[in-house]
Amino acid sequence: MTLLSAPPQPAGLADAGPAPLAPAARLLPALAAVYRAQLARAKVARIPLLFVATFQSLGILVMMRGVVDAGQTSAARSVVAGSSVLVVAFVALNLLAQYFGRLRATGGLDHYATLPVPAASVVLGAAAAYASFTLPGTLVTAAAGAVTFGLPLGQLWVLLAVVPLAGAALSGLGAVCGLLAPKQEIATMLGQLGMSAALLLGVLPVDHLPQPVLWLRDLLPSTYGVEAFARTFTPDPDWAAVAGDLAVCAGVGVVSLAAATWAYRRATTR
């Protein structure tokens, strides 16, 4: 009885080791690919939620108009700036926490973990896609608030800096909440609590808040975006103070996105 022998292999193939893996994608091309994919996916699912976020902020403006008179300039600035940045908090913090919480609960993170892309590109791409939808709603809310409270409209261009910087800081926090929460329901709860904090601490006039609440307000990264935007409603804005507030937003954004990248690595390796 003869045994079947394996077919002869080409010369040199038997001595060759395992084929090398393809090199990992670079950060910027991978970031662009994730951003485009998330943006295309979010067009259908997130646009209705953006309308909800904008309508919610407009409703808060109308409600606060019954409490704050147009003559109370300082309070009116806080209300309009806080309501505008609230659109960013709803999408970048609340929805992103729910998104990553759902990915972790359903095993969707395993798909991203198999891709040869840096962890930072996944976090930054998703955060940028979510934050991109907030600019139109923020502009509409700010313009409507300025008209309602009789504030000048000439400095709304500052939102082009406020939205991405505040969005980066809040997106990082939202991603951390979603990636570290042990359950999807807890991620949703944390996102809702963060948005509620942005609502209460950002929209209410500072003069009406007790000192302990002001300390909590200083810990919220969106506060500095609110302050930067509110300063531009004055007749002669203090641009140095505006730049300082935006710099704080940028610094917190770098830290929070780095924390989100660490949380993503932790979630995909456990």
Image: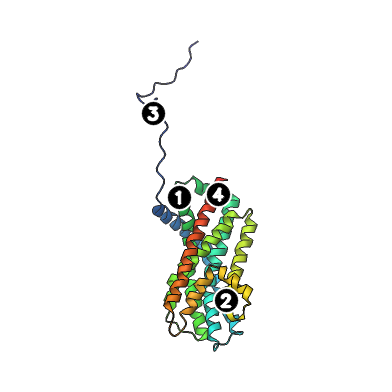
Q: CA distance from mark 3 to mark 1?
A: 29 Å
Quarter that holds the C terminus? top right
Q: Amino acid at mark 4?
A: Arg
Q: Which residue is mark 4?
A: 266
Give the number of the mark in front: 2 or 3. 2
Residue appearing at x 49%, y 66% in the figure: 167
Tag 2 residue:
203
Quick one: label 4, few (<14), some, or many (20+) residues within 10 Å? few
**Mark 2 or mark 4, earlier in chain:** 2
Instruction: Identify the residue under disc 3.
Output: 16
Kindly state the secondary structure of the residue where label 4 is placed: helix
Residue 118, labelled with which disc? 1
Front residue of 18 and 211: 211
Q: Position of residue 124 (x, y in %)?
A: 47, 57
Mark 2 belongs to which amino acid?
A: Val
Spatial CA distance of label 2 from label 4 is 35 Å
Q: CA distance from mark 1 to mark 4?
A: 13 Å
Q: Position of residue 162 (x, y in %)?
A: 46, 71
- Assign a secondary structure to mark 1: loop
Q: Residue at x 49, y 68 (%)?
A: 166
Residue furthest out toward the left: 11
